[in-house]
Image: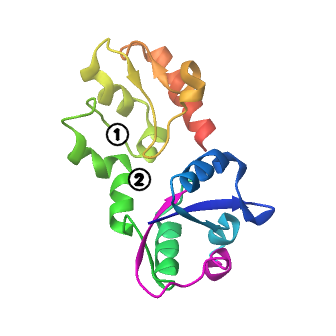
Amino acid sequence: MRILFCSDPLNSRSVDVDYELEMNTAKSLGFKVDFVHLEDLLDLKVQQALRLIEPLHTLETVIYRGWMLSPEHYEKLYQGLLKKNLELINDPTQYVTCHYFPNSYPIIKDYTPKSRWLEIDAVHQDYNSIYESVAEFHQQPILIKDYVKSRKHEWEDACFIPDASDKKQLDYVVKNFIERQG
């Protein structure tokens, strides 16, 4: 089994500094490591992104450990690696199931807090849809996040609402969340 790390944006032969400790740990445990050049992958230059990876004679499993990818980019990475006889541990369908919270919720709903979601268009048009969606939480604390990420590093301004019935706080946090998530 191999682990595929994102390379440093300026040096495709070394690991992205944010993954250096993980890569060194993986190597010390006997894992083979390879690099993908994320910028090339995001530009859909898949062969260029994987240029440092030698094709194998037999199929081998690989784990991607890097920055989040859209399903489209993950699919391109998956197909590009298959051409080198490397298969990501999760196929593109499994990636989408795990990557987007509404897709995984039916599988994990018995093990995770009760959750609700709205389409962003509904939120932009009318905050009443938010009030209706959170009404069942009464005065319980709630978290706001999108399908993939939260803003937990901005806990009080764009993530956490101590009382779901507090419309003023709800408006403030949701507005900040939407603006900061883009």
Quarter holding residue 130: top left
Residue 119: x, y in percent? Answer: 40, 46
Name which of mark 2 and mark 1 comes first in the sequence: 2
Amino acid identity at mark 1: Trp
Which residue sits furthest left? 110
**Could you tell me how far apart the alpha carbons at marks 2 and 1 are, in whole angstroms?**
15 Å
Q: Is residue 115 magenta?
A: no
Look at the numbered disc 2 and give the secondary structure of its residue: helix
Picture coordinates of residue 82, whole percent (x, y)? 45, 81
Q: Position of residue 57 (x, y in %)?
A: 46, 88
Drawn side of residue 87 relative to residue 56, left or right: left
- Callout 2: 10 Å neighbours few (<14), some, many (20+)? some
Q: Nearer the viewer, residue 110 or 157?
A: 110
Give the residue number, with chain letter if any, for mark 1.
Answer: 117
| Magenta span | 45-66
Residue 170, visible in the rendered structure: no
Report the residue marked by disc 2. 99
Q: What is the total number of numbered labels drawn onto the structure image?
A: 2
Q: Which amino acid type corresponds to the residue marked 2 in the rendered image?
A: His
Q: Residue at x 53, y 29 (%)?
A: 152
Relative height, residue 64 to residue 145 (above, below): below
Q: Residues within 10 Å of mark 1 (few under 14, many from 20)?
A: some
The residue positioned 51% from the left and 58% from the top of the image is 30
Q: Residue furthest right?
A: 10
Element on which disc 1 rests: loop
Is residue 36 positioned above or below 65 on the image?
below
Q: Where's the C terminus, which quadrant?
A: top right
